[in-house]
Structure formats: C-alpha cells, structure tokens
Amino acid sequence: MIRVPTLMARAAAAILLASMLVLAGCHSGVSKNDHIATSQGQFDYTIKAYKSGQFIVDGAVLSAADTGSHFAYLKDQGKLPKTVLVLPSDDSKVRDNHLGFMARMALDYNFAVYYDKKGELVRLNAVEAQARQLEDTPQKGALPDRMAGKEASSSPYDTQNGGGGQGQPQR
C-alpha cells in the first residue's frame, strides 16, 4: 500500500475544493435557451407558424394582430393558456418574425412560449427575443379594375349601397 504524506493529501483536497468552487461560480444555473424535452400534449395551446408572419390558430390563418386579438379574447373569457407551443407548418418554418410576435404576446399576456428549433423544443425568452409590435398582414391585394369603387355589400339588387338594378319587389 502506498502511503501519501498528510500534507500532500490535504493540498490535493484543497486544490480539488477550490477548482469545484471556481467552476460552480462560473455557472449561473440557467442556460441561455432552456431546452425542454417534452411532448406536445403537455402544452395548453398549440399554434403553427405560417407565411409572412402569420399563424394558423385553430385551423384558421390569422395575422399577428388577429392572433393577439384571439389571445385577448381568451383572456376576457378566463381561458388564457399558460403555455403555448409554436410549431412549423407544412408551408413555413418558425422564423424570427414569428418569434418576435410571440415574444410580444408572451409579454402582454404572461404565458410561456415554446418553439421547435431543429427538432428540439426551446423556451422563448421574451426579453432577449426583441418583441415586435403586432402588425396586420403587410401585403393586401389590390382590387381589379372592374371592382374599383364597389363595396363588398353592394349587389345588383341593393339600391341603398350604390348597386344598380331595379331593386327588390315590394310585397
């Protein structure tokens, strides 16, 4: 059996303890992105990212502003989710503008947002994600010339809204 001098054993123990304290001091206990290994069933609400900063919510394509209005409605009804999962859709992946809009909603409505980043679920840090002002769909299609000046409510039988025609017969 090898005998280690007492002074040398104490020095080695002190060096080991000092190195553990230094390494523990460097680690803050939290990673930059909290990586979450969990399934979709554990989230209160799931939405999908869509083209041009839009979202698919309950099967409907909504702009960021409309999605925010949807969460405001849920808040009024007392059904605001605590966790929201953002997944890529068949048409688009989760982009930075989606994350910016979701960061704004997370700050406004106090829920946690998780998103799929290369097959791994990551919690969105709303403060570091540079929350964006919610905006409506930026590209609105121009009306064709034949539709210029007409309203959606006008019809050939509607005389009050500028539609032509003879009107409906009175009975």
Image: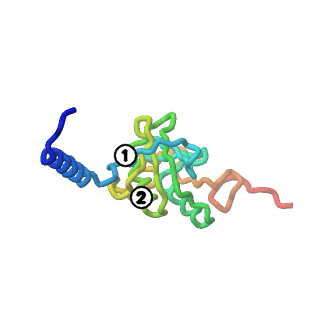
Judged from the image, the secondary structure of the residue bearing numbered disc 1 is helix
Which residue sits at x=56%, y=57%?
A: 81
Dot 1: within a 10 Å radius of its alpha carbon, few (fewer than 14), some, or many (20 or more) residues? few
Residue 86 on image: x %, y %: 49, 46
The answer to whether residue 169 is left or right of residue 126 is: right
Q: Nearer the viewer, residue 56 or 102?
A: 102
Q: How many discs appear?
A: 2
Amino acid carrying mark 2 in the image: Arg
Judged from the image, the secondary structure of the residue bearing numbered disc 2 is helix
Which residue sits at x=40%, y=49%?
A: 99
Q: Residue furthest right?
A: 171
> What's the coloring here?
rainbow
Q: Nearer the viewer, residue 75 or 23?
A: 23
Residue 119 on image: x %, y %: 44, 35
Q: CA distance from mark 2 to mark 1?
A: 12 Å
> Where does label 1 land, which residue?
96
* Residue 127 image-quadrant placement: bottom left
> Where does label 2 land, which residue?
104
Residue 147 on image: x %, y %: 55, 47
Which residue sits at x=43%, y=62%?
A: 107
Q: Nearer the viewer, residue 2 or 90?
A: 2
Q: Earlier in the sequence, mark 2 or mark 1?
A: 1
